Image (cartoon, coloured by chain):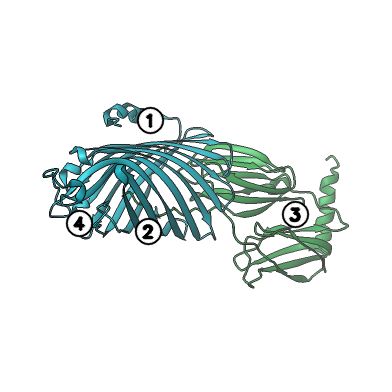
Amino acid sequence: MSIRLHRCLPLLCGLLAGLTAGPAVAQSWSPEVDLGWVHNDNVTNSIRQQKDDSAATISASVQQVRVLSRDWQGSLKLGADTKLWREYSGLNLSHFSAQAGLRRKFGLGPYATKLDLSFEAFHQLADVSEWSGNGYRAAAALQKRFTPQWFGRLTADLKRLDAGRAVYSGTVATLAAAVDYDLTPQWRVSAEIRYGEGDQLSWCRESFPEFIGKGPQWTDGIFGGDWFPYESDGNHRGGHFRVVRALGDRSALSLGYDFNESRAPKNHTYRNHIVSLNFTHAF
Amino acid sequence: MPFNPLKLAALLLATAGWLGAGGVTVTATDQKNEAVPELVVWLDPLGAPVPPADPAELAATVEQFNEEFDPYTIAVRLGTKVEFPNRDDVQHHVYSLSSPARFEIPLHGGDETEAVVMDQTGHVPVGCNIHDWMISHIIVVDTPWFGTTDESGRLALTDLPAGPYKLTAWHPRLRKTDEREINLVAGETLAVPVELRLRPDRRIRRAPTAGGSRY
């Protein structure tokens, strides 16, 4: 599955033009920063000889929301993020993104259902130059607040990356269902389950039984030795559980656990257990 | 000059109040013995007419500032014109779906002020359709004696005619209003301690949600 970015540019440009030319009054830009730490027990996405690593994450964004009518809002978001791994610096990735969003609210008040549509174009920079490239992400989210404490959402997400080398390129479609529950005004717990299909990027060794006799592979040197990247088409199942502590109205601290299980043909299954700690501040 | 019975009644009541004025000081605490600010308190006279309102005093303001309503709770008299000035540089869409006042003030931007006349008594919760966490509670009462407690949980009402009153206290975290009868004596200030059992604060949270891994 491949949808080239340039085919989506007219849509993105149309959304941006609509947002900037609308009759709404000028809105201020809202900056937000997120600093985090993440640990992944299987950064090779491998079924054996898994390697783990930790990374520092930094992201910053500015968003402008334009109220188009009682029921419609448009948004424009510019962002940058980077992930710096402690041991395997070849995994370091940075993104520069522009996202246009459209929100339809079905009624008045906090309990009205919301439908969010967004399209994001991004450029990815990687330490391994062949991993750099352009991509896009299209998403739809249906959100509903049931009580002041309970909030639910269903999301559908399609992400595509066209990298310098085909093995890093790929498309993944994901469906997810999530709920938030506010235990108190300060404490929130969030849970999500998801299912995805698409391309999986993994690393393995030429000495693995599956690859013996297939000849030398292109290696990227991220994990050293004879480790090489390969891609397969499969499905992903996973979820996360997160505890979030509000620090005032504009900051929050989050501790999360993500689980991911990816199945490729021939029952090649790998798992990731990811723990993350994040601090977010909205200015 | 034509005879105006309303002005005459107001004059008589004002004179009566001046001759025999009393006061009340409310001190509100919760089940943890902590002060309860933003408690709306009003006094309805029992067996006596309510003095007519001075039209010049029938005005109140609920600001939108820093993407919050200010004040969080407010009492106004029946017939009050409540203005909703937007002090932010973002748009707000103020609304209420309540029975006493159902209204919408759509999409007003910075430095724009719209107003609504509160012509029925009761509780008027006000929200913003853009920022779901924004909420203010307007209590519309048919009496001139009302107010909200300060940070120390205190409210002083003065210059009330002596006599019996029903004292009512309302807060968003109360299951039902707290009501009691009091008797004011001319020249004295009655101290009324109000002990309340408040429910947990269940406002919609505003803080951002941190976290999320892109890996």
A150 to B130, vertically: above or below? below
Q: Are marks 1 and 3 on the same chain?
A: no
Place of residue B141 in the rendered image (x, y in percent of width and height, measured from the top left)? 74, 51
Residue at 13% x, 45% y is A213
Q: Calculate the distance from the C-alpha at mark 1 to the C-alpha at mark 2.
A: 31 Å
> What residue is pinned by disc 4?
A88
Q: Decide which of A127, B177 is in the foreground and name it.
A: A127
Residue at 59% x, 60% y is B201
Mark 3 burial class by Cα count in 10 Å: few <14, some 14-19, many 20+: some
User: What number is the disc on residue A15?
Assistant: 1
* Front of the two marks 4 and 1: 4
Tell me the colour chain B is drawn in: green
A262 to A242, vertically: above or below? above
* Residue type highlighted by circle 2: Phe
* Front of the two marks 1 and 3: 1
Quarter of the image where one finds residue B103: top right
* Residue type highlighted by circle 4: Tyr
State which chain is coloured cyan: A
Place of residue A245 in the rendered image (x, y in percent of width and height, measured from the top left)? 46, 61
User: What number is the disc on residue B144?
Assistant: 3
* Residue type highlighted by circle 1: Leu
| Secondary structure at numbered mark 2 | strand
Place of residue B166 in the rendered image (x, y in percent of width and height, measured from the top left)? 81, 60
A90 relative position to A66: left or right: left
Q: Point out the residue furthest to the left here.
A: A216
Place of residue A240 in the rendered image (x, y in percent of width and height, measured from the top left)? 42, 53
Q: Kindly check if marks 4 and 3 are in contact, taking CB atoms under 8 A apart as contact.
A: no
Q: Kindly check if marks 2 and 3 are in contact, taking CB atoms under 8 A apart as contact.
A: no
User: What number is the disc on residue A279?
Assistant: 2
Q: Point out the residue furthest to the right here.
A: B47
Mark 1 burial class by Cα count in 10 Å: few <14, some 14-19, many 20+: many
